[in-house]
Image (cartoon, helix red, strand yellow):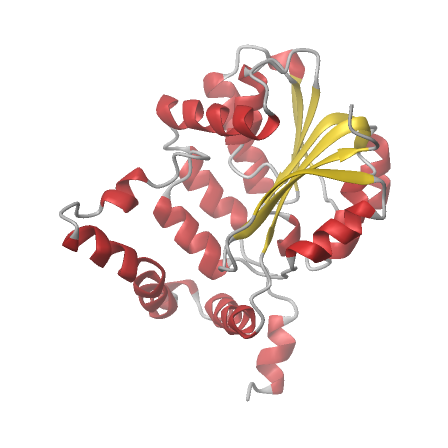
Amino acid sequence: MMSRSFQAHASNMKFEFGENWKKFANRIEESQIFEAQASLTHVLQSTDLAGKRFLDVGSGSGLLSLAASRLGAEVHSFDIDLQSVEATLQLKQRYSVKDSSWHIEKGSALDGEYIASLGTFDIVYCWGVLHHTGAMWKALQNISLLVAEKGILVIAIYNDQGRASQYWLRIKEIYNWLPSWARFIVLGPALVRLWGPTTLRDFFSGQPFHTWMAYGKERGMAPWRDVIDWVGGYPFEVAKPEGIFEFYHRRGFVLINLKTCAGGRGCNEFVFQRGEML
C-alpha cells in the first residue's frame, strides 16, 4: 500500500511532456514530415486543406501542425507546456514558409475562457492529449465547442484496460516520484516489457529490430521518445470506446471512423463530424 506522503506528492505530479517533445522535434527530418502528412490525409480523407481552419490541441512537437500547414490549412496550435510551444515555434521557423497562416501559443484545454476566445474550426485535431490533463471529461467537453458545424473532430484517447490500466497508473506515479537520475529503474524494465516480445519476434523471423526501425511511419514518431512518453505520461486517464462514442453522440456528433487498439494499452482513435453527415 502506498504511503500517505507518496499519495499526497502524486496528486501534484505532472510529467514534463514538453522536454521530451523538444528533444524529438530537434531531430525531425523531411521523411517524418512526409509520413505525418500521409497520416493526416488518410485520417481526413483529403490531400488538400486549403481554406480550412485547423486547430492542433496540445501540439507537442508541432509535427502534425506542420503537416497541416503544408497541406494548405490555416493552423492554430496551442499547448499548456511552454517547452512544447517552443518546440512548435522552432519547427515552424525551420520548415514553414507560410508564417502568417500558422499561429502558435500557450493555452489550456481546461481553460474555459481561453477556449471561448478561439472561435470554431473546420478541423480540430487532438491526438493523445486530453487523458493527460487531469480532468479528461471536462477537456473533452471544452474541445467539442471548438468544432464548427459540419466540422471534423479527430481525437485519440487511451483505452481502458481495467486492472492493467491501474497497473500502469502506479508505474507512472513511481516514475514521476523518482528523481530524474533514478528513473532508469522504471524505464529499463518498462522498455523490456513494451518492446521485448516484438524484438524477439523480429529476431527469430530474421529481421532484427525491423519494427523498432520502421516504427512511427504512421505519424512520424520516434520509438524511444514514445517509450518515455508512455512510462512518464501523468496524469493518466482512460476510457472505453463506447464511453467516448456516447459522450460525443449526446453532443450532436456523428462517428465517421473508429480505429481501436484491439483492447490493448494504446489509444482508440475517433473521427467525428459535428451535425448530420453531408
Residue at the (45%, 61%) spot, across then down: 231
Camera-side residue of 62 and 18: 62
Would residue 187 be seen by someone viewing this image from the given angle? yes
Count of labels shown?
Answer: 0
Residue 106 left/right relative to 193: right
Residue at the (55%, 50%) spot, across then down: 260
Camera-side residue of 158 and 233: 158
Residue at the (80%, 26%) spot, across then down: 150
Residue 165 spot, x, y in % from top left: 55, 68
Residue 198 left/right relative to 269: left
Residue 186 left/right relative to 219: left
Residue 58 spot, x, y in % from top left: 63, 40
Residue at the (42%, 34%) spot, across then down: 220
Camera-side residue of 204 and 223: 204
Camera-side residue of 111 and 127: 127
Residue 85 spot, x, y in % from top left: 59, 35
Q: Looking at the rendering, in which quadrant would you find the C terminus?
A: top right
Which quadrant of the figure has residue 166?
Answer: bottom right
Q: Looking at the rendering, in which quadrant would you find the N terminus?
A: bottom right
88 up-or-down from 180: above or below: above
Residue 28 spot, x, y in % from top left: 39, 30
Which quadrant of the figure has residue 104?
Answer: top right
Would residue 111 be seen by someone viewing this image from the given angle? no
